[in-house]
């Protein structure tokens, strides 16, 4: 089992999609171990998106991600990093299959509703979890359905 960092971006929060997105991860059987409704400041935004510094869309990306509240979360489960990415769809909602979060709720690359740790960037999940959460803000607990979700 592994943990992945997931965030409903400001467009998703403003459009009232937070509950729907949380429901999808719950329905899948993933376990919520941390959640924080917050507004990201400039410094955190630049650190979080550090890999994109210098790219033409970087300033707009930082401006957007700091423009309103986000719902930052940590979800846990078997293969959680990759499974969450699959549920999110492609980076561009226009290329995302219906049934995925971006494919169902987005149309534009710069307003793609959700962020998830990159499964092709090992360690990005731990880096992002550490960036947004203190250790004591993550909850260790057993969920009653675990015996029914996993063989
Ligand atoms: P995140 O979960 O937000 O990290 O998305 P991602 O991992 O699917 O994509 P990536 O990390 O490559 O890019 C980060 C974010 O920058 C994306 O979610 C897009 O909103 C935005 N972005 C990426 N590429 C472009 C681009 O070419 N143009 C614009 N305007 N935005 C981009
Ligand atoms: Mg990314």
Image (cartoon, grey):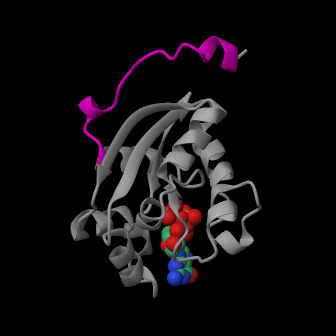
Task: Return the residue nearer the eye: 44 or 18.
Answer: 18
* Location of residue 60 (image quadrant): bottom left
Horizontal arrangement in the rendering, residue 126 relative to residue 22 (left or right): left
Part of the protein shown in magenta: 132-149
* Location of residue 79 (image quadrant): top right
Task: Return the residue nearer the eye: 29 or 136.
Answer: 29
The quarter of the image holding the N terminus is top right
Residue at x-position 44% and y-position 53%:
7
Residue at x-position 46% and y-position 67%:
11
Horizontal arrangement in the rendering, residue 134 relative to residue 55 (left or right): left
Residue furthest front as drawn = 16
* Residue 92 part of the magenta segment: no
The quarter of the image holding the C terminus is top right
Picture coordinates of residue 16 (x, y %)? 47, 58
Horizontal arrangement in the rendering, residue 61 relative to residue 31 (left or right): left
* Residue 145 part of the magenta segment: yes
Picture coordinates of residue 142 (x, y %)? 47, 15
Residue furthest bottom as drawn = 56
Picture coordinates of residue 26 (x, y %)? 57, 34
Residue at x-position 42% and y-position 64%:
14
How many marks do you count on the picture? 0
Task: Return the residue nearer the eye: 3 or 15.
Answer: 15
Residue at x-position 45% and y-position 88%:
56
């Amino acid at each position: 089992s592994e943990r992945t960092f997931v965030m409903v971006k400001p467009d998703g929060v403003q459009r009232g999609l937070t509950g729907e997105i949380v429901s999808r991860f719950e329905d899948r059987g993933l376990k919520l171990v941390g959640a924080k409704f917050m507004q990201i400041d400039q410094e955190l935004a630049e650190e979080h998106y550090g890999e994109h510094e210098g790219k033409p869309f970087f300033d707009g990306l930082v401006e957007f991600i700091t423009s309103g509240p986000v719902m930052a979360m940590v979800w846990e489960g078997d293969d959680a990093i990759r499974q969450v990415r699959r549920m999110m769809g492609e980076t561009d909602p226009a290329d995302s299959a219906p049934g995925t979060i971006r494919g169902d709720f987005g149309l534009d690359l710069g307003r793609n509703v959700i962020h998830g740790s990159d499964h092709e960037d090992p360690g990005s999940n731990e880096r992002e979890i550490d960036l947004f959460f203190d250790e004591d803000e993550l909850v260790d607990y057993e969920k009653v359905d675990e015996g029914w979700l996993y063989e």
